[in-house]
Amino acid sequence: MPKLWTETIAAHRNAVREAIMDTTAALVAEYGLAAVTMSRIAEQTGIGRATLYKYFGDVEAIMVAWHDRQISRHLDYLAQVRDQADGPDARLDAVLRAYALIHHEHHGGELTALLHRGEHVEDARRRLTEFLHDLITEAARNGRIRTDIDPDELALYCLHALEAANRVASTAAVGRLVAIVLAGLTAPDG
């Protein structure tokens, strides 16, 4: 098969997969997870049910794939935020704020309970922990961040503490939460 043809087929399959995920997420947001069926997804996407089943086995599998895509996008965004900040302290501060704001904008619920379990979430948590570990280690070299606690423990502290941002009422409250987390990271003599 010619390379162009193979790339065209792969692009088409990717476009169909993306459309299925986007349609499913929109339906779940509008009607709730329990009301969304594979038939409805196929109809709204404009594909046959048989085609839909070639891509995904059930609604949960679609939502897990959608969530994986969202996680990758969030990690890419956090890397962009990191790369735009000047200096280790500013990078850590900017990433923690961005992470907290992501949580603030994405509230929990039945969908969160479904999607925040399983192997794909553990992989994302590992990647995020490594990402923060590196930022914390870099900022600790400047003397601002404590070195008496392992950077992995500090990264987990940040992740868990900032997840509370999905329950605060305003972005001002998110800013206060980030300030408290940063204070917890600060070296005792800093």
Image (cartoon, rainbow, N blue to C red):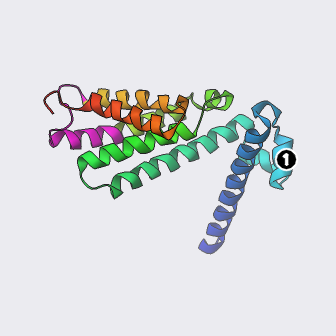
Q: Which residues are magenta?
A: 131-150
Query: For this view, does 9 lie left or right of residue 178?
Result: right
Residue at 57 percent of width and 42 percent of height: 68
Query: For this view, does 7 lie left or right of residue 152?
Result: right
Q: 4 and 131: which one is in front?
A: 131
User: At which x and y percent is residue 166?
Assistant: 54, 32
Which quadrant of the structure image shows residue 63?
top right
Query: For this view, does 76 lie left or right of residue 20?
Result: left
Residue at 49 percent of width and 32 percent of height: 165
User: At which x and y percent is residue 36?
Assistant: 81, 37
Is residue 57 in view from this perspective?
Answer: no
Residue 116's place in the image compared with 20, above or below, is above
Residue at 40 percent of width and 55 percent of height: 80
Residue at 17 percent of width and 27 percent of height: 188
Within 10 angstroms of label 1, few (less than 14), some, or many (20 or more) residues?
A: some
**Mark 1 falls on what kind of element?**
helix
User: At which x and y percent is residue 131?
Assistant: 35, 42
